[in-house]
Amino acid sequence: MPRLAVTSLLLSHFRSHRRTEMTFDGRPVAIFGPNGAGKTNVIEAVSLLSPGRGLRRAAPDEIARRPEALGWKIRADVESVHQLHEVETRAEAGASRSVIIDGKSAPQAALGRIARMLWLVPAMDRLWIEGAEGRRRFLDRMTLSFEPAHAEAVLTYEKAMRERNRLLRDDVHEPRWYEALEAQMAEAGAVIQRNRSEAVARVAAAQTGAETAFPAADLVILDTEGPERATDAAALAGMLAAGRARDRAAGRTLSGPHRADLGAIYQAKGVPAAQASTGEQKALLISLILANARALADDFGAPPILLLDEVAAHLDAGRRASLYDEICALGAQAFLTGTGAELFDTLGSRAQAFEVADAGGLSVVSERILP
């Protein structure tokens, strides 16, 4: 059976890990230990084997181990649908992050063609009740999982928008200065909206008829105002041109894909996710991650790597066991963290286990056997 798995991992001067080496066999990976020992640092390192800034969205200089501040390195062997790749990503002190794949320098986007990853971290527990920015980021990570080139469209759009915003703040009125930037924003924005809509449709289809212990959610891309979801570049360009006077008054672009929001309705109760209980909100998030994973398994040829930090929080024992059963049935390599081995007791021999301990500010990792 084709699989996607990290089979070895080396961390060098990465946060609390001076040098940590781990070997994996493709089963789910349970990582346990006290708070602050360095568990999340391990799965953050795995997340950096995909495009972007990882699950903490940290800048390269924030990752280097202190007090040395020598820079950091991650090296991994990745099995990707019958192909083996050696991946290295690193950053020297004061430098940007670099990527090497199979001995050759590569752009970050190339990581998305090797490994697809989904993650759930405690900061996302408030996703439905906080601002739209976090939900938009969640939507774009979902979209990126299906279409790695989505990141390039977002970067193109944001770069052109920053230039347009500079013109707006400087109170520039010359139309020709705006037209080229708005054309770039419109072309990239139309791609962004199409990608997002297709991703939501795929996740919705993966929820339909799935046997799962987790509640389903109806997703919708919300518009703050105007035709932000238009997939036609001409319509987006017209919207931007028509909004110049208002945007100049505000000093920024007020309409476009960067203002979109993601809404979710708890199907069983017919209420917005924001009105569900804390436990229900967590269960809805897990449900979406699992649906995303099922859709990706069909799309990519193997289930994605799942990074689930402190996933047991707000889950009772029964639902926790159901989650583990679903991960194993999916055949995904999942990295799960928790404070104690007992949180993973129902996984048993279906998982590898590692204990992370703090030794005077240094993380020490030891392989264990779950009871």
Image (cartoon, grey):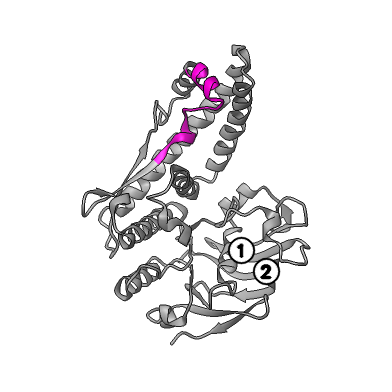
Q: Distance between the residues labelled 1 and 2?
A: 8 Å
Note whether residue 297 is visible.
no
Residue 57 shows which numbered tag? none
150 magenta-colored: no
Residue 87 position, x and y percent, is 66, 60
Establish if 3 lies above or below 129: below
Residue at (46, 84) in percent of width and height: 370
Residue at (53, 77) in percent of width and height: 34
Establish if 100 lies above or below 109: below
Q: Mark 2 points at which residue?
A: 11
In the figure, residue 66 lies in which quadrant?
bottom right
Q: What residue type is labelled 2?
A: Leu
Indicate the quadrant containing the C terminus: top left, top right, bottom left or bottom right: bottom left
252 magenta-colored: yes
Q: Mark 1 points at which residue?
A: 45
Q: What stretch is highlighted in magenta?
A: 243-261
Q: How many marks?
A: 2
| Element assignment for label 2 | strand
Q: Looking at the image, do the residues carrying marks 1 and 2 touch, with CB atoms under 8 Å apart?
A: yes
Residue at (53, 73) in percent of width and height: 35
Residue 366 position, x and y percent, is 60, 82
Residue 233 position, x and y percent, is 48, 24
Name the side, left or right, on which 257 lies relative to 50.
left
The local crowd at label 2, few if under 14, some if 14 to 19, many if 20 or more residues have their Cα within 10 Å, is: many
Residue at (47, 72) in percent of width and height: 28
Compare residues 324 and 251 and report the one nearer the observer: 251
Q: Earlier in the sequence, mark 1 or mark 2?
A: 2
In the figure, residue 18 lies in which quadrant?
bottom right
| Element assignment for label 1 | helix
